[in-house]
Image (spheres, rainbow, N blue to C red):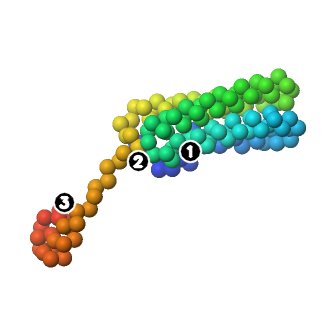
C-alpha cells in the first residue's frame, strides 16, 4: 500500500468536498441565514478537519481531527433533519444529502481504523539521517578511500 502524499488524494476528503458543494448548492437561496450558516459551516468543517489533521504530521493529531470531521458529518445529518422538518428541502433531496453525509462519516471511520492499524506515527517522528561532516573531508582529501568505503553504503 502506498503512502498518501496530500490530503486531496484521500477519498474521505474528496467525498467531504462533494458534501460541502451539495450543501452550498442546496441552501444557497435560503432566507434563514442562521440555519444556512450553521449547515454550511458544518459541511465545510468535515473537509477542513480532514485536511488540517493530515497536515499536522502526527498520527495522534490526525486521529483527533478525523474524529472532529466525523462529528461534523453527524452535525450535517442532524441539520438536514431540521431542514426537512422546516420544509427547506424535499424528501428526495434529504435522502441524497443524508446518504452523502453518512458516507463521509463511514469513510472517515474506515480511515481511522486504517490509521490505528498502521505502525507509522507521523512525519514529525520520522527519522532523518544526519550527514556526517567527515564524509566531505574524506571525499575531498582521500577520493580512493571514499570510493571504497562510502559509495557502496
The span from disc 1 to disc 3 (Cα, nearest Å) is 38 Å
Determine which residue is flagged by label 2: 123
State which quadrant residue 71 falls in.
top right
**Where 126 sits versus 109, above or below?**
below
User: In the image, is residue 79 above or below residue 149?
Assistant: above
| Label 2 – label 1 distance at C-alpha | 15 Å
Category of crowding for the residue at label 2, using alpha-carbon neighbours closer than 10 angstroms: few (below 14), some (14–19), many (at least 20) = few
Question: Which residue was labeled with disc 1?
Answer: 51
Quarter of the image for residue 144 reads bottom left
Q: Which of 148 and 125 lies nearest the eye of the viewer? A: 125
| Disc 3 packing (10 Å; few <14; some 14–19; many ≥20) | few
Q: Quadrant of the C terminus?
A: bottom left
Give the residue at mark 3: 153
Residue pictured at 42% horizontal, 46% vertical: 3
Q: Quadrant of residue 33?
A: top right
Label 3 SS: loop
**Element assignment for label 1:** helix
- CB under 8 Å between callouts 2 and 3? no
Q: Residue furthest top?
A: 85
Amino acid at each position: 500500500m502506498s503512502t498518501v502524499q496530500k490530503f486531496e488524494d484521500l477519498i474521505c476528503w474528496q467525498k467531504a468536498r462533494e458534501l460541502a458543494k451539495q450543501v452550498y448548492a442546496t441552501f444557497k437561496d435560503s432566507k434563514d441565514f442562521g440555519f444556512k450558516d450553521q449547515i454550511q459551516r458544518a459541511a465545510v468543517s468535515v473537509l477542513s478537519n480532514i485536511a488540517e489533521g493530515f497536515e499536522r504530521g502526527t498520527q495522534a493529531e490526525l486521529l483527533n481531527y478525523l474524529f472532529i470531521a466525523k462529528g461534523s458529518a453527524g452535525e450535517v445529518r442532524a441539520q438536514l433533519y431540521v431542514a426537512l422538518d422546516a420544509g427547506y428541502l424535499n424528501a428526495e433531496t434529504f435522502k441524497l444529502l443524508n446518504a452523502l453525509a453518512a458516507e463521509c462519516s463511514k469513510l472517515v471511520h474506515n480511515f481511522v481504523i486504517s490509521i490505528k492499524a498502521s505502525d507509522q506515527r507521523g512525519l514529525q517522528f520520522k527519522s532523518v539521517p544526519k550527514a556526517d561532516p567527515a564524509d566531505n573531508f574524506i571525499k575531498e582529501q582521500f577520493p580512493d578511500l571514499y570510493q571504497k568505503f562510502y559509495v557502496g553504503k
